[in-house]
Structures are given as C-alpha cells and as structure tokens.
Image (spheres, rainbow, N blue to C red):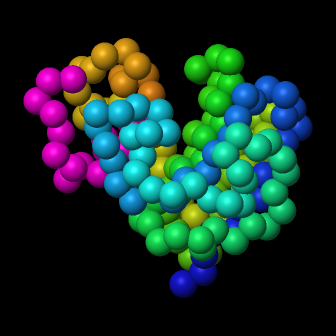
C-alpha cells in the first residue's frame, strides 16, 4: 500500500494565519477545532508554518485519517482537506490562495448531515463536523 504524497503550493500565503496537518485516530466531541481531532501533527509542515511542500510522503504516524487545515481571518475561507489512504487515487483542492494535491488519498467531503444541534462554535466547526461523522462509534454527550 502506498502512502499519501502531499504537495502544497501557496499562491497567497498571507491569506492564512496558520496551517496544520494531523494524523487523526480519534475524536473528542467535548472540544472543537484542532483539539477535537485526536492524533499527532505531521512534521511535513510545522504547526503554524506556511510554506510550500513538494512531494512529502505522509507516513509518520499510523491513523485512519489525515486532516489538513488552513486557518484564515474569515471562517468561511478556512481550508479543510480530510481523507484517507487509497492507492492510485488523486485528490486536489485549488483556489486563488492555495493548491493542495494528495496522491494515494481519497478526500472526504465534510457535511453537517447527521450532526446534532450544538453550540455555534461546535456546529460551525468543520473539524468537529468531520470528527462527528468519521468516528460515529465515539460516545457522544447527551447535551451539547
């Protein structure tokens, strides 16, 4: 099985406050943003660093998912690329700020379908939405 190979090119790096990549192996529904995704950060991009990456092999940790997040000043413009290993598949995200290309990777579209009503900081958080559905077996609190 081939590992995901990541290439990131920033056309407008100043658009991002910080960027991170995490190997996700669990979900903590009591947290939101990066803290809700249980796992280890990749060293391919140090937490907060904004730089181009050329063909970095993502194999530092074992996890079912990889999550790439770019935080901006506007929530709606945050970058979210989540997915899992899949030999031979290519996933790509591109806009005027950044181009993210991941070989051997199946991208998962993040959806609010099936998420319960929650406080705004949870309900609007793409990381939390992803964790809620990707780790459906995780015990969830009765009230949020």
From the viewer's side, name the closer residue of 120 and 93: 120
Instruction: Specify the quadrant of the image occupied by residue 99.
Output: top right
Q: Which residue is drawn at 76% across and 44% down?
A: 49
Q: Where is residue 91 in the image (x, y as percent from the top left)?
A: 64, 57
For the question of whether residue 134 can be seen, the reply is no
Q: Where is residue 72 in the image (x, y as percent from the top left)?
A: 68, 25
In the displayed structure image, the side of residue 45 where residue 127 appears, left or right: left
From the viewer's side, name the closer residue of 61 and 80: 61
Q: For the N terminus, which image quadrant? A: bottom right
Depicted 24 relative to depicted 120: above or below: below
Depicted 3 relative to depicted 96: above or below: below
Instruction: Specify the quadrant of the image occupied by residue 127.
Output: top left
Q: Is residue 136 magenta?
A: yes
Depicted 143 relative to depicted 82: above or below: above
Q: Does the magenta stretch include residue 107?
A: no
The mark tally for this picture is 0
Q: Position of residue 25 (x, y in %)?
A: 39, 59
Q: Which residue is drawn at 77% across and 59% down?
A: 7
Depicted 61 relative to depicted 47: above or below: below
Q: For the C terminus, which image quadrant? A: top left
Q: Residue at x 42, y 65 (%)?
A: 64
In the displayed structure image, the side of residue 123 where residue 40 appears, left or right: right
Q: Residue at x 60, y 80 (%)?
A: 2
From the viewer's side, name the closer residue of 128 and 17: 17
Residue closest to the far bottom: 1
Residue closest to the far left: 142
Tell me where the magenta segment starts and ends, as one range. Answer: 127-144
For the question of whether residue 109 can be seen, the reply is yes
């Amino acid at each position: 099985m081939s590992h995901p190979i990541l290439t990131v090119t920033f056309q407008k790096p100043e658009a991002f406050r910080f960027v991170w990549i995490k190997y996700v192996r669990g979900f903590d529904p009591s947290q939101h943003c990066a803290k809700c995704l249980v796992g280890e950060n990749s060293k391919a991009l140090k937490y907060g660093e904004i730089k181009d990456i050329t063909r970095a092999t993502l194999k530092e940790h074992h996890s079912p998912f990889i999550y790439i997040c770019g935080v901006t000043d506007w929530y709606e413009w945050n970058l979210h690329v989540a997915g899992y290993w899949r030999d031979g598949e290519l996933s790509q995200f591109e806009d005027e700020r950044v181009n993210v290309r991941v070989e051997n990777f199946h991208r998962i579209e993040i959806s609010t379908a099936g998420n319960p009503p929650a406080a705004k900081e949870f309900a609007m958080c793409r990381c939390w939405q992803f964790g809620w559905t990707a780790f459906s077996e995780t015990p969830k609190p009765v009230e949020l």
